[in-house]
Image (cartoon, rainbow, N blue to C red):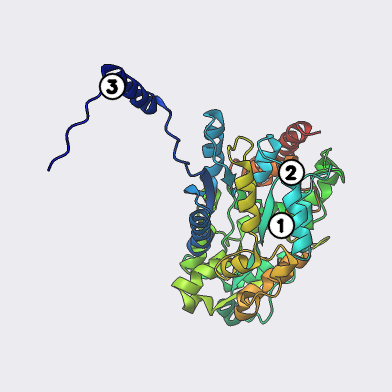
Amino acid sequence: MADSPIRRTRREFLTSASLGAAVLLMPVPAVAQRPKMIYWCYQFLKESDDARANFAREWAKKNNVDLQLTMVPLKEFLPKITAAIEAKATPDIVESNAVELRGRGQLLDVTDIYRKLEKTYGGWVGNAHKFMLEPEGRVHHILYGFQGFMLIARDDLLREAGFKSPPATWAEMLEQAKKAQRPPRVYGLGIPVSNQTDSQVWEDMMKSYGARLADEAGKRVVLGDHKREVWEFLDFFTEVWKAGVLPPGVATWDNTMNNSTYQSGKAVFILNPVTLSLWLEQNNPELLAKTAHYTYPRGPKAHIHPVTFGSRSILKYTKVPELARQFLWDSMEPGKMDRELSVSQWGPVLKAYLDFDVWKKKPFMKGLVDMSLRAEPQGWPDVFNDAWREQFTNTTISRMLQRLVIDSWPRDKAFAEALDVLNRIYAKYA
């Protein structure tokens, strides 16, 4: 037997309807959104790039983070980040141009991460602290690897030319290059003389002749006091230019041309990081077997062999500062770095990294440890500061050389222009 319908009064109906409407009008709790983090990764060597990018993706998945990762080639980074700053749409973490961004006041202070890493992992290797610690003791970027140019040579061609040992001086390098080359198929020196930063290896050579750009404080330009040393270097450079050991077009090379010239077997010597050899390992092991890796030769007055670096920094506009700081910390964990350094061009920056197997397994990687322990910061004996970095990016010394051999300027005019550029740059930071 069916139940009789329940009769409701008009007052009861209105009260029930009112309560139902109130329930509908109550705010529904928002579903928690995943934090979003934007990461710009330095792009150069695929295996190394993939290792860092894969870690970032795994980290984001583990920490429930919405990661937006962009691979940015070094030569595109400054224009891209400048536009992002102007548009107020910057990434949270970047891997390039930390010194320039620090000079522009764009980075968060990460001194506490620097100190914690130092304490936890046995201290920093070599001169790593000189790249990060500012005069007042603050830190705005965290190094994850050293990278330095080495003298990379075709040992087979040098032996055929009668040379049993690497050149001890730059002058010896030129002599070996002249005798071992076979133009137009193989040229002696694959070194650019262009408006790209790889051309600034000529600055290192010039300093090995006894010159320097600025005083001990890195404030006042003193190159004018070293005119005799600069002239001796220019004599050497002019001899190189006239010897026919440089391939055609070096005045317009970009930073990839020294690599591709060697990779195609067209150079006896180049100055380049071991990225070249990592590429050869995967793509041309036969050429790698003919390739040797040496420290820089000496000049008449000094042995100059600087190192560069890879680092991460946090843009001050980030909306997830603590999350970004956690990523910087996690990205330096030794187990992760062991895997990464085994496929990259980077030397160790923390002492906990010194026992990794990669330094023992690959002969061409052994030099990275010694380089990391001994080499001076890029720019040495000048102070590695914002002024030096700007003139380096400006390729000041290479431009002076171009004036001599491309524009046929007299030495005094080319030298005076270089001095003027240096004085204007350093005055901005005095």
Q: Amino acid at mark 3?
A: Phe
Q: Residue at x 32, y 24 (%)?
A: 16
- Mark 3, residue position: 13
The picture quadrant where one finds residue 413 is: top right
| Numbered mark located on residue 236 in the image | 1
Mark 1 packing: few (<14 Cα in 10 Å), some, or many (20+)?
A: some
Measuring from the top left, give residue 172's x and y in whole percent.
Answer: 71, 69
Assess whether mark 3 and mark 1 are in contact (beta carbons under 8 angstroms). Answer: no
| Vertical side of 45 occupied by 107: above or below | above
Q: Earlier in the sequence, mark 1 or mark 3?
A: 3
Vertical position of residue 165 compared to residue 314: above or below? below
Estimate the spatial distance between the alpha carbons at disc 1 and disc 2, rounded to whole Å: 24 Å
The reply to whether residue 137 is in sight is: yes
Between label 1 and label 3, give the one nearer the viewer.
3
What amino acid is found at the position of numbered circle 2 in the picture? Trp
Q: Earlier in the sequence, mark 3 or mark 2?
A: 3
Q: Tell me the CA gap for discs 3 and 2.
A: 82 Å
